[in-house]
Image: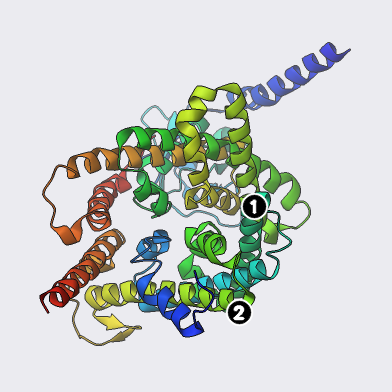
């Protein structure tokens, strides 16, 4: 009984995912992609009339999230064989969003509607890279600095702290997502965000502590001390707040948490590599300790500014 | 920490000898992140002062009821409650300043300085002393933030509190986000230098 039910569920999900693909392939439109900063290229299954295809009044384009804002086109050009149309927009497009294009009278069909979006995996990967490098939480958002300066003296400490932190942040971010979407939002309890999120973080830290102590005492001996520090880190509470602000779904949440943890690990490791060298260097006595660490971190922050133009996919 | 300290001593200790930013080196995130102007520093300082004083007093009142084993979660939840209060108040009455401070108001909940004061002071001392201690620490944070904001605003945009005083912009670099690290580092080194200089001059006498 149970088994047939599971089979039905699997079948239903498969249909749910595959159905849109077949629907797209049937019609006039073969392929649609973004190109450059402000273009959409549409490939058609057969040639169409040039006058109709190049009349920009025939197209209506908007982002799926807000259908009220119609994006302005500056031109539409038909390719040589009459099989592909390039739509050029006046303003750059936000390629993260799904765009809906509605075309009138194309190939004699009254109205053709199709969606243009980037590959979702690429978008998820973009979130990861963004949290890791472009918006690194330590060097470009200036969060988690207390723990950052406290534990970046030695490479081994840095690695331990980074790994424990990544583990805790992924678990607590996923839990916060569930609480936010299934308890806080349905019951209009959004003002309790801070209390609930910090409670969940403490809970996760306590749970990881207990589980690790029983399951792997050796790992606990080397990593246990860092668990207490995790809770004093602003990043761990910033991630749930960001995901609540942006209405991320569960995959996006996972990627953001992974990127935040990985970015913290990266920053700690880089800083500890410099700190180990600084111990041998001749530093003016007034700069010893924290002042020089701050100046090094400032240089890292400037270096990380270089990632700001990075765009993957 | 002795009980015989006067309120004035408790306040000056928070501002000078145990300044949260320059001496204890805690709560550095906002000191680097949003200290671009004196006003930003002042606003966040007020928020921290509020949370610090009220959490200190709350914990001090209930210190005999809280079981020692669950004291840290209790502190966290107390702080979170007061942060929620100031967060909602600022969002309602000062939306412009709130937008500038962004996520940092909510992040007060993770500031090490507040938990540390509760653990070190408020859970042992009477309500009155806890109040003044919280006041001192909050003011110390505010003064530190405003000092960094003053340096950055003066050097970066040649202005103080938004009024143009210099008429030119000496070093635009200081208003850029990453300069926060440099300013804090240099100011710490400067205070260290004063201390060394002071001790040396005393020793020579």
What residue did someone put label 1 on?
B73
| Label 1 residue SS | helix
Q: Tell me the subunit letter for badge 1.
A: B
- With respect to residue B120, does A183 lie above or below? above
User: Rounded to the nearest whole Å, what is the CA distance between mark 2 and mark 1?
Assistant: 24 Å
Closer to viewer: mark 2 or mark 1:
2
The disc placed on residue B128 is 2
- Label whose residue precedes the other's in the sequence (2 or 1): 1
**Is the residue at mark 2 from the same chain as the one at mark 1?**
yes
Look at the image and tell me in which quarter the C terminus of chain B lies: bottom left
Q: Are marks 2 and 1 in contact (CB under 8 Å)?
A: no
Going 68% across and 48% down the picture, which residue do you hit?
A180
Q: Residues within 10 Å of mark 1 (few under 14, many from 20)?
A: some
The disc placed on residue B100 is none
- With respect to residue A269, does A185 lie above or below? below
Residue A305: horizontal and vertical position, in percent?
A: 28, 50
């Amino acid at each position: 009984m149970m088994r047939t039910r599971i089979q039905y569920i699997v079948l239903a999900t498969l249909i749910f995912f595959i159905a849109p693909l077949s629907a797209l392939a049937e019609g006039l439109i073969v392929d649609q992609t973004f190109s450059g900063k402000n273009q959409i290229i549409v490939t058609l299954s057969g040639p169409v009339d040039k006058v109709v295809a190049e009349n920009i009044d025939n197209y209506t384009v908007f982002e799926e999230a807000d259908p009220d804002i119609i994006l302005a086109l500056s031109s539409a050009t038909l390719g040589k064989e009459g099989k592909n149309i390039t739509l050029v927009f006046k303003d750059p497009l936000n390629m993260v969003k799904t765009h809906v294009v509605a075309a009138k009278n194309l190939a004699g069909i009254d109205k053709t509607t199709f969606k243009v979006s980037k590959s979702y995996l690429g978008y998820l990967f973009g979130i990861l890279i963004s949290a890791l490098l472009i918006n690194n939480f330590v060097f470009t958002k200036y969060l988690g600095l207390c723990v950052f300066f406290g534990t970046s003296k030695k490479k081994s400490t840095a690695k331990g702290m980074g790994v424990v932190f990544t583990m805790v942040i992924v678990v607590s971010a996923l839990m916060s997502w569930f609480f936010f979407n299934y308890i806080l939002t349905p019951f209009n309890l959004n003002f309790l965000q801070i209390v609930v999120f910090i409670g969940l973080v403490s809970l996760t830290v306590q749970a990881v502590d207990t589980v690790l102590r029983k399951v792997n005492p050796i790992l606990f001996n080397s990593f246990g001390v860092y668990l207490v520090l995790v809770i004093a880190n602003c990043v761990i509470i910033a991630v749930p707040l960001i995901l609540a602000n942006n209405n991320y779904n569960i995959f996006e949440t996972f990627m953001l948490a992974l990127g935040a943890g990985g970015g913290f690990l990266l920053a700690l490791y880089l800083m500890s590599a410099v700190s180990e060298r600084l111990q041998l260097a001749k530093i003016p006595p007034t700069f010893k300790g924290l002042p020089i660490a701050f100046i090094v971190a400032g240089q890292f922050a400037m270096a990380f500014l270089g990632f700001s133009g990075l765009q993957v996919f | 920490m002795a009980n015989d300290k006067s309120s004035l001593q408790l306040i000056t200790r928070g501002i000078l000898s145990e300044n949260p930013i320059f001496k204890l080196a805690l709560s550095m995130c906002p000191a680097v992140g949003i200290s671009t102007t004196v006003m930003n520093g002042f606003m966040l300082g007020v928020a921290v002062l509020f949370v610090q004083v009220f959490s200190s007093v709350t914990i001090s009142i209930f210190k005999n009821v809280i079981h020692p084993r669950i004291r840290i979660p209790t502190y966290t939840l107390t702080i979170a409650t007061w942060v929620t209060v100031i967060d909602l108040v600022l969002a309602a009455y000062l939306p412009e300043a709130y937008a500038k401070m962004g996520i940092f108001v909510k992040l007060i909940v993770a500031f090490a300085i507040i938990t540390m004061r509760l653990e070190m002071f408020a859970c042992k001392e009477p309500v009155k002393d806890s109040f003044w201690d919280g006041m001192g620490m909050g003011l110390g944070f505010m003064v530190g933030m405003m000092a960094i904001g003053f340096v950055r605003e003066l050097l970066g945009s040649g202005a103080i509190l938004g009024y143009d005083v210099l008429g030119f912009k000496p070093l635009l670099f200081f208003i850029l986000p990453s300069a926060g690290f440099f300013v804090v580092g240099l100011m710490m080194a400067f205070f260290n230098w004063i201390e060394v200089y002071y001790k040396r001059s005393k020793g020579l006498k």
